[in-house]
Image: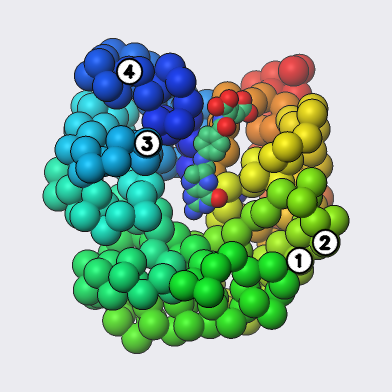
Amino acid sequence: MIIIGELINASRKAIGAAIEGKDAEAIKKVARDQFEAGANFIDVNAGIFVGEEPAYLKWLVETVQEEVDAPCAIDSPDPKAIEAGLAVHKGTPMINSISLEKERYDKLLPILAGTDLRVIALCMSDEGMPETVEDRLKIADKLVNGLIQKNVKVENIFVDPLVQPISVNNTFGVEFLDSVEEIMKRFPGIHTACGLSNISYGLPARKFMNQAFMVMAIAKGLDGAIMNPLDQKMMANIIAAEALAGKDKFCMSYLKAFRAKKFEV
Ligand code: THG
């Protein structure tokens, strides 16, 4: 599982305050904690600061990279903000995200063309949020083919089929899961990723719902997630589910995690 640590997100109260107060030490601690817990990318999102998002994202990228040796996932719907973060990023970050929304697509495609940037291709268009597998696959096809045509490698693309709350419509879980399966089948070598916790929005005991959904998604081939790596039960579930999905030869990772006491949570 490619883990994208979600905790540096301005919509979280403490993080919003730390960003506004330029409290670098607070941000660095959250970056380090996620890195040490196993995050492969550190997501940075300053989405609540309308108008100032580019400047804040730039500061977040610099601050995180002073602390940890991991690339960022630069998380914004605004291409200008993404460019600002990208300009100061050392190494190859992940762009979170391109979508089929015209303005976003037209501005981000040339930035991605011919590079080794990793990119999340979010299944959203100007027609709104997809609901069915068919809606998602239509968008995914266009996004993936567009990126490949611009010399983005398939293995650098993470399709996000878009998780929607199960509290809104009881089919949203299955539509998402079947989309993951179909996308992984249709484009060999590609990745899928998502903000998994959207599934439990509006419900109590969200952690259980999130963990169960993660296990089901791994069974369908999900291999990336924007998530909280400090949730040790979630991390343990991922290790077990990946072994069960046939992704862990001789259960080596499972056994290693056991010896490191990762299941004693
Ligand atoms: N797809 C893509 N990018 C995304 C999302 C997506 N970026 C934003 C969002 N959705 C994913 N990021 C977050 C960040 C924080 C939280 C949820 C999603 C959040 N965190 C809990 C909190 O603040 O209390 C902590 C989580 C926990 O303790 O388990 O709510 O869908 N491409």
As measured in the structure, the alpha-carbon distance from the residue carrying label 3 to the one carrying label 4 is 13 Å
Residue under numbered circle 2 = 171
Quadrant of the displayed image that contains ligand 1: top right
Q: Do the numbered discs 4 and 1 sit on residues whose CB atoms are within 8 Å? A: no
Q: Estimate the x, y position of residue 240 in percent, counting from the top left.
A: 77, 40
Of tags 1 and 2, which is closer to the observer? 2
Question: Which callout, 4 or 1, points at the residue further toward the start of the chain?
Answer: 4
Q: Do the numbered discs 3 and 4 sit on residues whose CB atoms are within 8 Å? A: no
* Amino acid beneath label 1: Glu
Question: Which callout, 1 or 3, points at the residue further toward the start of the chain?
Answer: 3
Is residue 91 visible in this depiction of the protein?
no
Q: What's the mark number on residue 175?
A: 1
* Amino acid beneath label 2: Thr
* Amino acid beneath label 4: Ala
Can you tell which quarter of the image residue 114 is in? bottom left
Q: What's the mark number on residue 23?
A: none
Residue under numbered circle 3 = 48
* Amino acid beneath label 3: Ile
Residue under numbered circle 4 = 18
Q: Estimate the x, y position of residue 86 in percent, counting from the top left.
A: 21, 50
Q: Do the numbered discs 1 and 2 sit on residues whose CB atoms are within 8 Å? A: yes
Q: Estimate the x, y position of residue 133 in percent, counting from the top left.
A: 71, 74
Query: Horizontal placement of 1 versus 42: left or right?
Result: right
Query: Horizontal placement of 32 versus 192: left or right?
Result: left
User: Ligand 1: does it lie within 8 Å of the C-beta at label 1?
Assistant: no
Against 137, is 59 above or below? above
Q: Estimate the x, y position of residue 163 in percent, counting from the top left.
A: 65, 55
